[in-house]
Image (cartoon, rainbow, N blue to C red):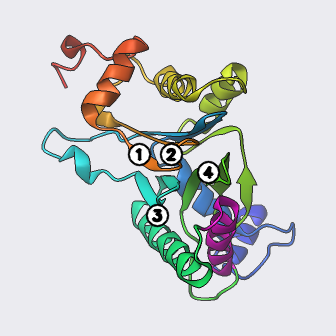
Amino acid sequence: MQGQAQQQAYDRGITIFSPDGRLYQVEYAREAVKRGTASIGVRTQDGVVLAVDKRVPSPLLEDSSVEKLHKADDHVGIASAGHVADARQLIDFARRQAQVNQLRYGEPIGVETLTKEVTDHIQQYTQVGGARPFGVALIVGGIDNGEPRLFETDPSGTPYEWKALAVGADRGDLQDYLEENYDEEADLDGGISLALDALASVKEGGLLPNEVGLATIDVESERFEQFEQDRIETHLEENDLLQEPDETEDE
């Protein structure tokens, strides 16, 4: 009881460290990320793959209104997991920073530079009283001078660079799958297959095209491309991951 009371004394203010050096509000923000549906990023030799679980909760909901994949700039895409409204704020911030860089320097912003601009913005909300941290994690993928780059933003404001990662629900299981199956020599199609296989590994009965989001940024064109539903369905069929219609009739 004493330990619980001590925690409650420190978890109401984002600017106060607990005696053991923890910021409880940041940890709570990470829990909000875990409640969001999964997003996956995979870096390959030919580009970056972003895949998301959209999870449409009702047949009356328009699939396109579930936004988890975003174009930040022509050469940068972002996938999110966690609090959707927080994600939109950070996406808008990232887009503004990309435009400012283009106007100021006459060149596209670097993926690492953009990620650190976003994480610096996130970090400010861990030091200001009367505000709360962003309850979302972002996967930022893009091309820097012909080189694929893949980053994660954490609610603490810390950036990490990855070869492949998952954020959101079932992160532990997804990350284990990626670590076991990641191939540094894979091409873009191999990255797509790995991302979809990982999503399917934590879901029973396969995947539905309208509940999966898929996007790539390839080295050749250096452009963000979000896949249409029929193209996603083709990839699911090729990887034998398409959920059979009779498995959803009772839903």
Q: Which residues are magenta?
A: 109-126
For disc 1, the marked residue is: 225
Q: Is residue 240 left or right of residue 248?
A: right
Q: Main secondary structure of the magenta part?
A: helix
Q: Residues within 10 Å of mark 1 (few under 14, many from 20)?
A: some
Mark 4 against mark 2, which lies toward the viewer? 2
Inspect the image, locate mark 3, and give the three-letter code of the amino acid beneath it: Ala
Mark 1 against mark 3, which lies toward the viewer? 1
Label at residue 87: 3
> What's the distance in space between the residues labelled 1 and 4, CA to CA?
13 Å
For disc 2, the marked residue is: 221
Q: Residues within 10 Å of mark 2 (few under 14, many from 20)?
A: few
Q: Is residue 123 magenta?
A: yes
Say which quadrant the C terminus sits in.
top left
Q: Answer yes or no: is residue 143 visible.
A: yes
| Residue 67 image position (x, y, % from top left) | 34, 53
> What's the distance in space between the residues labelled 1 and 3, CA to CA?
20 Å
For disc 4, the marked residue is: 143
> Which sits earlier in the primary sequence, circle 2 or circle 3?
3
Q: Is residue 52 magenta?
A: no
Q: Are marks 4 and 2 in contact (CB under 8 Å)?
A: no
Inspect the image, locate mark 4, and give the three-letter code of the amino acid beneath it: Ile
Q: Is residue 117 above or below residue 40?
A: below
